[in-house]
Amino acid sequence: MTGNAIFLFNLLSTWYMVGLIWMVQIVHYNLFDRVGSNVFAHYEAEHNRLITPIVGIPMLIEIATAAILLWQTPSFMPKSAVWVGLGLIVVIWLSTLLLQIPAHQRLLEGFDPATYKRLVSSNWIRTIAWSARGLILGYYLSLVLQRIK
């Protein structure tokens, strides 16, 4: 597969996650405190079960294609941009592993306002990092599209 194809898969997986993370941040997480404490633990368990493949597969595609771009960097993209994008993925994964997953694990025991607040506020790290990745990749896509004119 060429660097251009890898770039396209990276762009698509990133923009999928940009849309998803904004929906989760603005809509989904903001509804957690409206579920009701008597059913919240079950709701949280179902959230974890259902969201894992929806986020896990694109995240794996994104990190794999970002790493491959280090070796197959398209001519229109400097390697430094690839490193910045990979750095943002590291931030996203660290935030997920160190902040969001532990918060979700705690919420499996039942609704806790402090944990919920930490989940929503710390998720801005991922929202901003994915948005930055999307903007970077979008910029390089725009360079390619300008060449086609």
Image (cartoon, rainbow, N blue to C red):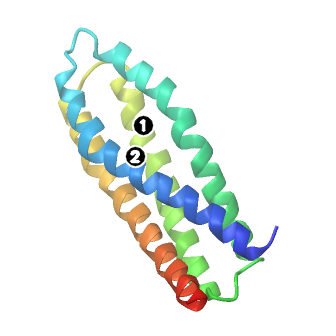
Q: Is residue 93 above or below residue 56?
A: below
> What is the CA distance from the residue labelled 1 to the residue labelled 2?
6 Å
Q: Amino acid at mark 2?
A: Leu
- Pinpoint residue 43: horizontal percent, then vertical percent: 35, 18
Label 2 element class: helix
Counting other residues with Cα less than 10 Å from the Cα at mark 1, is it few (<14), some (14-19), or many (20 or more)?
some
Nearer to us in this view, 13 or 116: 13
Q: Amino acid at mark 1?
A: Pro
Residue extending furthest toward the top: 38
From the image, tell me which residue sits under label 1: 102
Residue extending furthest toward the front: 149
91 to the left or right of 39: right
Per the rendering, the mark at residue 92 is none
Counting other residues with Cα less than 10 Å from the Cα at mark 2, is it few (<14), some (14-19), or many (20 or more)?
some
Q: Is residue 94 visible?
A: no
Locate the C terminus by quadrant: bottom right
Locate the N terminus by quadrant: bottom right
Label 1 element class: helix
**Residue 3 occupies quadrant:** bottom right
Answer whether labels 1 and 2 touch (C-beta < 8 Å). Answer: yes
Per the rendering, the mark at residue 99 is 2
Residue depicted at 24% across the width and 29% down the height: 32
Q: Is residue 20 above or below residue 41?
A: below
